[in-house]
Amino acid sequence: MRMFLTLLVALALAPEASAQVGPERLTGRFDTLVVTLRLRGEQPLGTMENDCVGSVGRRPALVFDYDPGDAPARGIEVRMVSATDTVLAVLVPGERFDSSGGPAACSDDEGGDLNPLLLLESPIAGRYTVLAGPLEAGVVAEAVLTVRAVD
């Protein structure tokens, strides 16, 4: 648990400084970001209390700024596809971690075929941090992460 809290404190200070990709920019409806990642399960994502299980790297997979402009999206879809069982979590603007010690928005297999998928409804403008990794600690996974503003 101590290693996990250390990761979240580091993200709260400057997530873009150590992200694999970013900061990128997502604007309005129908904008899309696609990145290829090499993920290593280095530390636990969360606890059973908040349904966030799995492992993530020591730095965020992606940091992006959402600016709805004149055409705000209904939601932001975050999807990852990999041959390895992977997990992802998203910290929304202003969020550091929830009361049980982990991110509030996380996914394991909601995208089908062991792939994670999250839909963040009514997104607000600001900086989002994506944490990602293989379900099992110590495993390395190749993955494609897609972030899409949806109407």
Image (cartoon, rainbow, N blue to C red):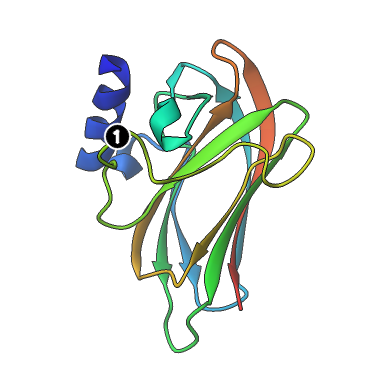
Residue at (60%, 23%) from the top-left corner?
A: 135
Farthest-out residue, bottom: 70
- Residue 80 position, x and y percent, is 66, 43
Residue at (26%, 44%) from the top-left corner?
A: 96
Along the horizontal axis of the image, is 31 left or right of 111? left
Badge 1 element? loop
Residue type at numbered disc 1: Ser
- Residue 8 position, x and y percent, is 28, 33
Along the horizontal axis of the image, is 16 left or right of 24? left
Residue at (29%, 37%) from the top-left corner?
A: 11
Give the residue at mark 1: 100
- Residue 119 position, x and y percent, is 56, 59
Q: Which of 68 and 43 is in front in this view?
A: 43
Farthest-out residue, front: 49
The N terminus, quarter of image? top left
- Residue 42 position, x and y percent, is 46, 16
The C terminus, quarter of image? bottom right
The correct choice, above or below, for 130 with respect to 100 in the image is: below
The crowding category of the residue bearing disc 1, from other C-alpha atoms within 10 Å (few below 14, some 14 to 19, many at least 20), is few
The correct choice, above or below, for 139 with respect to 104 in the image is: above
The correct choice, above or below, for 115 with respect to 41 in the image is: below
